[in-house]
């Protein structure tokens, strides 16, 4: 479908930032030791998915007019894939490499957070597609509750696991966790202010804010990880 040129420009900015970010993560990641390289691969998968989603959106693909509003379904597909992968990258930092035991506990914890994450994104899409305001509020509240479940799990049991990393590893994990969760708080805020919520900001502003958040949560997040891993023991 046809979208305004300001929106399209921002979507192209998103595409190029993700593509260049992927290349930078690759270059820096290639200097890592073999046992740490997978962190770079994961970061590159995240930015590649986003690059593809932005390319599609910039060309009007995966964008639908529902009840007179543009719904960027491509964005939700991007979130559905990349948010679990972002949580997985924190996970791979949190759990000390040498601790091979407790596998079932790890899988249990991980499934809970991933499930909450999927509920958050899918009900967020339902909320943006509801023409009835009560319906819109209902799905938003459900999505937000799922978001709270993620926060509680990440700051509770997952953060506890990272204590075993030792001082520098633990500090690094906490920094990355705070950085990512702080950024995530702005997504529902932009959503609420934007065309899916209260319509206080226009689609161009909404798109630009999402681009800034996405580049920070995906490109910068990945770059900070690959640039800092080298000196940290226990993280593999
Ligand atoms: C929605 C709307 C409903 C309420 C909540 C939301 C949260 C979305 C989040 C998205 C994070 C996206 C990221 C993308 C990739 O970089 C769905 C906006 C709570 C937290 C990190």
Image (cartoon, grey):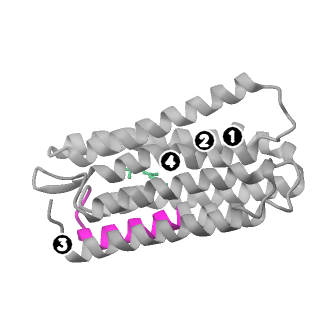
Residue bearing mark 2: 152
Q: Are marks 3 and 1 in contact (CB under 8 Å)?
A: no
Q: CA distance from mark 3 to mark 4?
A: 28 Å
Q: Where is residue 171 drawn, in percent x and y? A: 80, 58
Q: Nearer the viewer, residue 164 or 218?
A: 218
| Disc number lying in front (3 or 1) | 3
Of labels 3 and 2, the one closer to you: 3
Horizontally, residue 68 falls left or right of residue 165, namely left
Say if residue 137 shows up in the picture: no
Mark 1 or mark 4: which comes first in sequence?
A: 4
The residue at which mark 4 appears reads as 83
N-term-proximal mark, 3 vs 4: 3
98 relative position to 42: left or right: right
Q: Is residue 76 magenta?
A: no
**Please, what secondary structure does the residue beneath circle 4 have?**
helix
Callout 2 crowding tier (Cα within 10 Å): few <14, some 14–19, many ≥20: some
Q: Are marks 1 and 2 in contact (CB under 8 Å)?
A: yes
C-alpha separation, residue under disc 1 versus residue under disc 4: 19 Å
220 vs 167, nearest the viewer: 220
Q: Whole-percent x and y of residue 57?
A: 29, 60
Residue 199 colored in magenta in the image:
yes
- Residue furthest top as drawn: 104
Q: Name the residue that disc number 1 marks.
A: 156
Label 2: element kind: helix
Whether residue 110 is situated above or below residue 45 in the rendered picture: above
Mark 4: few/some/many CA within 10 Å (<14, 14-19, 20+): some
Q: Position of residue 108 (x, y in %)?
A: 64, 25
The magenta segment: 197-217
Q: Please give left or right for residue 51 compared with residue 235 in the image.
A: left
Report if the CB atoms under discs 1 and 4 are less than 8 Å apart.
no
Which of disc 2 and disc 4 is earlier in sequence?
4
């Amino acid at each position: 479908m046809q979208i305004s040129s300001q929106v399209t420009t921002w979507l192209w900015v998103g595409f190029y930032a993700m593509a260049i970010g992927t290349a930078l993560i690759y270059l820096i990641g290639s200097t890592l030791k073999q046992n740490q390289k997978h962190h770079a691969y994961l970061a590159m998968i995240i930015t590649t998915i986003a690059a593809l989603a932005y390319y599609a959106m910039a060309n009007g693909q995966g964008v639908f007019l529902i009840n007179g509003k543009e719904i960027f379904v491509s964005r939700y597909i991007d979130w559905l894939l990349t948010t679990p992968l972002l949580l997985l990258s924190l996970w791979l930092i949190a759990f000390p490499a040498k601790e091979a035991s407790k596998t079932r506990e790890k899988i249990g914890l991980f499934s809970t957070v991933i499930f909450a994450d999927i509920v958050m994104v899918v009900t967020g899409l339902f909320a943006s597609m509801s023409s009835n305001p009560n319906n819109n509020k209902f799905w938003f509240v459900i999505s937000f509750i799922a978001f709270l479940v993620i926060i509680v799990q990440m700051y509770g049991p997952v953060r506890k696991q990272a204590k075993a990393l030792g001082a520098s590893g633990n500090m690094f994990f906490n920094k990355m966790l705070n950085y990512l969760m702080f950024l995530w708080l702005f997504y529902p805020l932009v959503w609420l202010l934007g065309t899916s919520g209260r319509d206080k900001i226009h689609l161009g502003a909404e798109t630009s804010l999402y681009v800034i958040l996405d580049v920070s949560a995906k490109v910068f997040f990945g770059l900070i990880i690959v640039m800092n891993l080298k000196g940290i023991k226990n993280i593999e």
